[in-house]
Amino acid sequence: MAQNNLEQLAEQHKLHLERVKFVLIALQRELLQDYRADLDKRPLFKQGLTRLDDLSIGDVLTGAVTNVTHFGAFVDVGVDRDGLIHKNHMNNCELSIGDRIIASVLKVDVQRRQLGLRLENMLEETDTSFTLKTD
């Protein structure tokens, strides 16, 4: 596909050009291969938080979206379990795999290994750091 066609597609769907290219490459891969592991988007984790029981309700974390479903989005926040942002707690935002976000902790259930999150804001990548995404 020609570069200008990719740019038109990205603009039409309000996506970054790199994301469109990434999806096209993924579509050319083997069936059933999980391409999420190839994302080179590491969240900016808080130091010292490595386990679910390190978290408390109200903690504010950064993370990367690892999966999106009809009921919400799963986010890697640097602990041993991805957290879930239920669609009711997404502030009418549409998240995509690889998006980097700021979330607050709503629920920590260590016994059931569940982490409930609320989307607070999106992070936008810049050349050297991350800034809050403004529309």
Image (cartoon, rainbow, N blue to C red):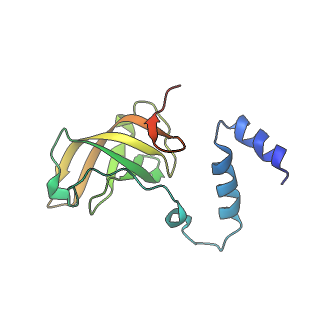
Front residue of 115/39: it is 39
* Labels in figure, total: 0
Q: Check the image and report above or below for 22 versus 72.
A: below
Q: Check the image and report above or below for 121 versus 44.
A: above
* Residue 32: x %, y % from top left: 58, 72
* Residue 68: x %, y % from top left: 47, 51
Quadrant in which residue 12 is drawn: top right
Front residue of 36/4: it is 4
**Residue at image coords 54%, 68%:** 34
**Residue at image coords 65%, 74%:** 30
**Residue at image coords 48%, 55%:** 41
Q: Check the image and report above or below for 11 versus 70.
A: above
**Residue at image coords 14%, 57%:** 53
Is 84 on the left or on the right of 73, as rendered? Answer: left
Front residue of 100/127: it is 127
Instruction: Please identify the residue farthest to the top as the structure is shown.
Output: 135
* Residue 60: x %, y % from top left: 25, 40
